[in-house]
Image (spheres, rainbow, N blue to C red):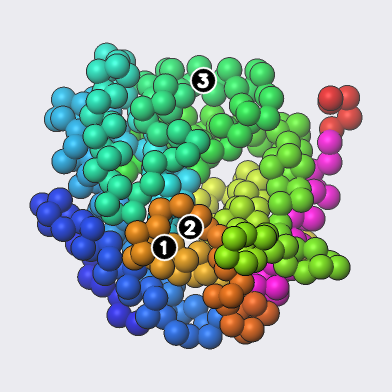
Amino acid sequence: MNVPLCVTDARDIRERGAELQRAWCESVLQDDHPPDDTAAFQRWLEAYQVQRRAFVLAGWAEAVSPDVRRRARLIALGSLARGEDLPQSDLDFALLTSADLRLDDAAPDVERFVRFMGPMGFSPCMGNVMGANPRWFGPEDAWMARVQKYAEFPDWANVRYLYMTVDAAPLEDAPQWALVAAQVRGVIAQSRFMKWQMAHLGIRGTVGWGAVRGVRWQASGDGAVFHVKDRFLAPMIHALRLLSLHHGVDALASVDRATSLGRIGALEGLRADAVVRALWFGWRLRARRHAECWLKGQRDAVDLVPRSSLSRAWQEALEEHLRTAQALERLVCRRFPKPRGSR
């Protein structure tokens, strides 16, 4: 498995971004190691994060006017912020702006940026978690007021926005973001109700594994498929973020969170190394599916892994790691019961 060289020059990326994306997709599909031998894939994923961030920064420089770039700072959200981006991960980002930048003035540039990123495997976020959305745009005081508003009316939608804001990292110099991040973390860490919401409304029942029927395959026109993001990776990532907020773990990457939580005994009887192995397996499975779809020109159903594409060894590994994901799901549901008096 040959890991491509990272290209960071904006001109090169502008001229051959799709070609570079193809090379990374072809590379990950060269990985023919057994299901739990993820060493080569780990090297690939670490290098690919450098490439993905270079893609984003080159697109920002190419598509956005100097005036808007001067008055707005790009904040990565989700998998890009955690260093877990894959070949067709959504483009999730926020903008921290100066007080004099209006969304109406910045929106055309931001929309050009989103279009520019498409050929390099960045799909627009289906939930519109992007800087052209007023919810993810504004100066520091607007962000602080927004966080306070969510905290004062903590319905599930607002609480979800708070959790999404936790997984964020500036891609440019933006010292003001640290204040926003600290406020968000503090609001959630102090709220038993918000922790219960994530555990029981966001995570409970989402792992695609059943004690009787095993893997919860979905029927599709091409046979049984498994949603590797929604039914495997997302519950684990959400659970590790929740536990990290509760225990004061500041790490952003999911592997670092799992390792830190294991070190302080916060995973109870669940071994941190089992959680880490499950994460690497899930990312590897998802990356392969993303790459296969991208090379075929397929931009939908990229997280649906066909059972027919998995050997028996891969199916057995999936079963093993889903049991770990379910154990993590049950841990957070036990840890964060519904507070008395809440409705």
- For residue 154, say whether it is visible: yes
Residue 255 point in image, percent of width and height: 54, 62
Task: Give the structural element (helix, strand or loop) at label 1.
Answer: helix
Q: Please name the residue that numbered disc 2 is placed on.
A: 302
- How packed mark 3 is, by other alpha carbons closer than 10 Å (few <14, some 14-19, many 20 or more), is some
Comparing 217 with 143, the one in front is: 217
- How packed mark 1 is, by other alpha carbons closer than 10 Å (few <14, some 14-19, many 20 or more), is some
Q: Please name the residue that numbered disc 1 is placed on.
A: 293
- Which residue is drawn at the image coordinates 61% and 26% (left, top)? 158
Comparing 99 with 263, the one in front is: 99
Which image quadrant for residue 288?
A: bottom left
Instruction: Residue 324: say if magenta.
Output: yes
Identify the disc placed on residue 117: none
Residue 252 point in image, percent of width and height: 50, 51
| Inter-mark Cα distance, 3 to 1 | 38 Å
Q: Are marks 2 and 1 in contact (CB under 8 Å)?
A: yes
Comparing 12 with 53, the one in front is: 12
Q: Are marks 2 and 3 in contact (CB under 8 Å)?
A: no
Q: Main secondary structure of the magenta part?
A: helix
Which image quadrant for residue 71?
A: top left
Residue 46 point in image, percent of width and height: 38, 66
- For residue 272, say whether it is visible: no
Quadrant in which the N terminus appears: bottom left
Instruction: Residue 208: say if magenta.
Output: no
Quadrant in which the C terminus appears: top right
| Inter-mark Cα distance, 2 to 3 | 33 Å
Which three-letter amino acid code belongs to the residue tagged 1?
Cys
Tag 1 or tag 2, which sits nearer the N-term? 1
Q: Please name the residue that numbered disc 3 is placed on.
A: 146
- Which residue is drawn at the image coordinates 57% and 65% (left, top)? 222
